[in-house]
Image: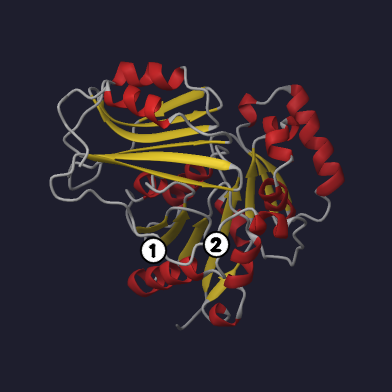
């Protein structure tokens, strides 16, 4: 290639708002530029790509089903190579799973194979200040090393943070943030595109081995999940690093009761639930994090083609899949569909 492609890793733990932030960046990019996004998800269904792949001059490729950093970068290399070859982007954004560890991703992108292809710029790590007092987060190796390897730490959702939350974050900055290129405060994922231009610095992970030993290695590239002919819906599960996921894919012709689904998620006690859903009131994005639910409408696609509904639940304890699935199926407005 005639010049190296500017590339940024945008990381952060579960529910911090990475996809919202990337969507903001994609809407803010120069109209004539082509940007490509590599999305990695812990769950098998793949939802973030469906949220992002709706903008002009933007190309998205997903690697679902686990952390792309844990098999010598093989899944990431294959997906990234295809993305570069097919889209010839002006910039690449990489969104690892919230449970992922960025060390091996950085090593791969700065290794000999990509040295003349990619220009790895600043790594941005989003953090919710409310989580710096939660042991489930601060006791997690990936959470801590996402912050350790960040060039720029971005406090997101600051409109929801209390004064105590902000004080705890400021204490963290005093202890760990002195070598960072930036400490920023935002709400609603409104990252300044200029931050992408800052250079990357060499940084050391603190708990990388702990993350790798907790995950079963994945030797193959997970293919995007798709419904077979005549199949109305399917369910897929995954687990690793002390976390569990279950996801569903539903045919585009199956709508769900909006109010019923809103009530279901409002009372659901899990770390993370997200869905892009066809409902009685239109297509909506549902995001639930630790009991807090938000609902938004995605932008309409120009071609108007109907899209499947995608749902994913992640928790740090085993999920009662049968009970949750029964609740979801009960909200279908076209009963009688069966899983093949």
Coordinates of residue 131 in the picture (x, y in percent): 68, 33
Question: Which is more foreground, mark 1 or mark 2?
Answer: 2
Q: Which residue is mark 1?
A: 34
Mark earlier in primary sequence (1, 2): 1
Q: Is residue 261 left or right of residue 163?
A: left
**Disc 1 + disc 2, Cβ < 8 Å:** no
| Total marks in image | 2
Quarter holding the C terminus is top left
Relative depth, front residue between 233 and 169: 233
Q: Secondary structure at mark 1?
A: loop
Q: Residues within 10 Å of mark 2 (few under 14, many from 20)?
A: some
Which residue does the image show at 16% across and 32% down from the upper left?
Answer: 337
Coordinates of residue 247 in the picture (x, y in percent): 38, 40
Q: Secondary structure at mark 2?
A: loop
Relative depth, front residue between 93 and 259: 259
Relative depth, front residue between 246 and 57: 246
Which residue does the image show at 78% across and 56% down from the upper left?
Answer: 206
Q: Which residue is mark 2?
A: 217
Which residue does the image show at 55% across and 62% down from the upper left?
Answer: 217
Q: Is residue 202 above or below residue 334?
A: below
Residue placed farthest to the right in the image? 175
Q: Is residue 77 left or right of residue 69?
A: left
Relative depth, front residue between 216 and 40: 216
Which residue does the image show at 53% across and 56% down from the upper left?
Answer: 67
Quarter holding the N terminus is bottom left
The numbered mark at residue 257 is none
**Which image quadrant is residue 39 in?**
bottom left
**Which image quadrant is residue 17 in?**
top right
């Amino acid at each position: 290639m005639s010049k190296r492609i500017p590339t940024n890793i945008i990381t952060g733990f579960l529910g911090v708002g990475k996809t919202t932030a990337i969507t903001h960046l994609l809407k803010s990019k120069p109209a004539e530029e082509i940007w490509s996004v590599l999305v990695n998800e812990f769950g098998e269904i793949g939802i973030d790509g469906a949220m992002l792949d709706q903008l002009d001059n933007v190309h998205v490729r997903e690697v679902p089903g686990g952390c792309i950093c844990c098999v010598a970068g093989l899944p990431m290399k294959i997906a990234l190579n295809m993305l570069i070859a097919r889209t010839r982007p002006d910039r690449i954004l990489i969104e690892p799973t919230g449970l992922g560890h960025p060390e091996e991703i950085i090593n791969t992108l700065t290794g000999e194979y990509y040295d003349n292809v990619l220009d790895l710029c600043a790594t941005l790590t989003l953090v919710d200040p409310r989580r710096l007092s939660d042991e489930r987060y601060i006791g997690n190796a990936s959470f801590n090393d996402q912050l350790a390897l960040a060039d720029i730490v971005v406090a997101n959702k600051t409109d929801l943070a209390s004064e105590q939350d902000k004080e705890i974050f400021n204490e963290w900055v005093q202890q760990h943030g002195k070598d960072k290129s930036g400490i920023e405060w935002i709400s609603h994922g409104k990252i300044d595109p200029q931050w992408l231009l800052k250079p990357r610095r060499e940084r050391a992970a603190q708990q990388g081995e702990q993350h790798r030993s907790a995950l079963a290695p994945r030797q193959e590239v997970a293919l995007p999940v798709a419904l077979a002919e005549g199949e109305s819906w399917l369910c897929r599960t995954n687990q690793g690093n002390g976390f569990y996921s279950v996801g569903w894919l539903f045919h585009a012709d199956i709508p769900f009761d909006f109010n019923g689904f809103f009530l279901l998620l409002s009372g659901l006690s899990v770390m993370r639930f997200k869905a892009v859903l066809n409902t009685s009131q239109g297509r909506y994005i549902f995001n639930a994090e630790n009991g807090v639910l938000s609902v938004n409408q995605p932008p309409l696609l120009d071609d108007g083609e109907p899209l499947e509904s995608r749902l994913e639940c992640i928790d740090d304890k085993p999920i009662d899949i049968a009970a949750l699935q029964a609740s979801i199926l009960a909200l279908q407005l076209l009963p009688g569909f069966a899983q093949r």
